[in-house]
Image: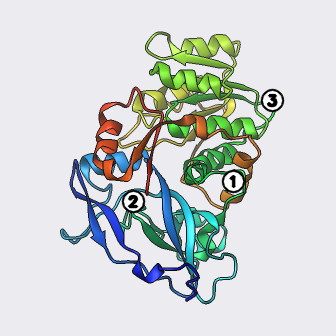
Amino acid sequence: MIMKTDGVNAMKNTEAILITPGKMEIKDAPMPVPGEHDVLIKVEYVGICGSDVHGFQFGPFIPPKDPNQKIGLGHECAGTVVAVGSAVTKFVPGDRVNIEPGVPCGKCSYCLSGNYNICPDVDFMATQPNYRGALTNYLVHPENFVYKLPENMSTMEGALVEPAAVGMHAALIGGARLGKKIVIMGCGCIGLMVLQGCKSLGAKEIVCVDTLPKRLEMAKQLGATTVINGLEEDAVAKCAEIFGGMGADIVFEAAGAKITAMQAIQIVARGGKIMMVGTQSGDVPVNFLKINREVTIQTSFRYANNYPMTIEAISSGLFDVKSMVTNTYAYEDVQQAFEDSVNKKAEIIKGVIKID
């Protein structure tokens, strides 16, 4: 192990732990020690994801088998390398980096085919099997899933590469490109990242639908050609008007709501594609007669091999993640950060926590 930063052995570590649903506490934690292929990172920013908010409210999506399991939250993070393992060749102390929070097995057929995002044995931060959260002063991570940030990117932007990669991945497999007519249902963080992913791939005609004015304003700022408030207008009828009754080539469902999933079926064009990006927690009825003209329905899950291109998109100005940050919290205010994320959804586009 190489530790070139003075005082590393004397460093103190803490972590924010979910004590019970609705209650976070910062507790002392062991200082992590990197293995030979690991990097030790001083965390600087952590984004608050919808899955973190769900975990805060209700506990993990997949509860741990051990009732005494320590539950951490947070997986969107960036910081500075303070030490590296003896076999690490890509990084040195002082490098500004972010991490890809899911570490796959690297051996199954999904990993070997390049689809490691659907590896059944992936160790994804803040979930099973280890529930290791990014809300901590220091963490270790495998070198192969750590990325160096360009000089013109802040570590706050670096932390938001993770949700941006979700949007980029969905846009890529959805087939977004110049000439495609696109509708995005839901303009939360992920919907806005899908919007920017589509724009970065050349799409020009993008309609965004939501019910919260602040989100629609942000969608317009980030390049949506038309925004529709679903509480004030009939989104299906409005889209039919916009596209001359022909429908949209690609409809991205990014709200994770039953109603928007059902509306997507009515909005998509013949031969078009519905991309299910949001997490549907229940059954959604599908009128297959409505879409039996060679419509494709495809799900999108996280990302695979998308970090380098997403970092480049942000660095080059194709993605604007900085403008999406509406709320920044100090680490010691982690409880308030999550309470606001639950109670002030109409006001918050993206919240981040700054770890000092």
Tell me the amino acid under the disc marked 2: Leu
Of tags 2 and 3, the one toward the viewer is 2
Q: Mark 1 points at which residue?
A: 311
Q: Which residue is drawn at 44% across and 69% down?
A: 138
Residue contact at pointers 2 and 3, CB within 8 angstroms:
no
Q: Is mark 2 on a helix, strand or loop?
A: loop
Query: Position of 229 compared to 239: left or right?
Result: left
Is the residue marked by circle 3 packed among few (<14), some (14-19), or many (20+) residues within 10 Å? few
Is the residue 331 above or below the residue 137 in the image? above
Give the colour scheme of this rendering: rainbow
Q: Residue 179: which disc?
A: 3
Tell me the amino acid under the disc marked 3: Gly
Q: Residue at x 64, y 68 (%)?
A: 95
Q: Tell me which label, 1 or 3, sits earlier in the chain.
A: 3
Q: How many numbered marks does the figure carry?
A: 3
Where is residue 101? Give x, y as percent: 51, 63
In the displayed orientation, state which residue is furthest to the front. 6
User: Foreground: 209 or 221?
Assistant: 221
Q: Residue 135: which disc?
A: 2
Q: Tell me which label, 2 or 1, sits earlier in the chain.
A: 2
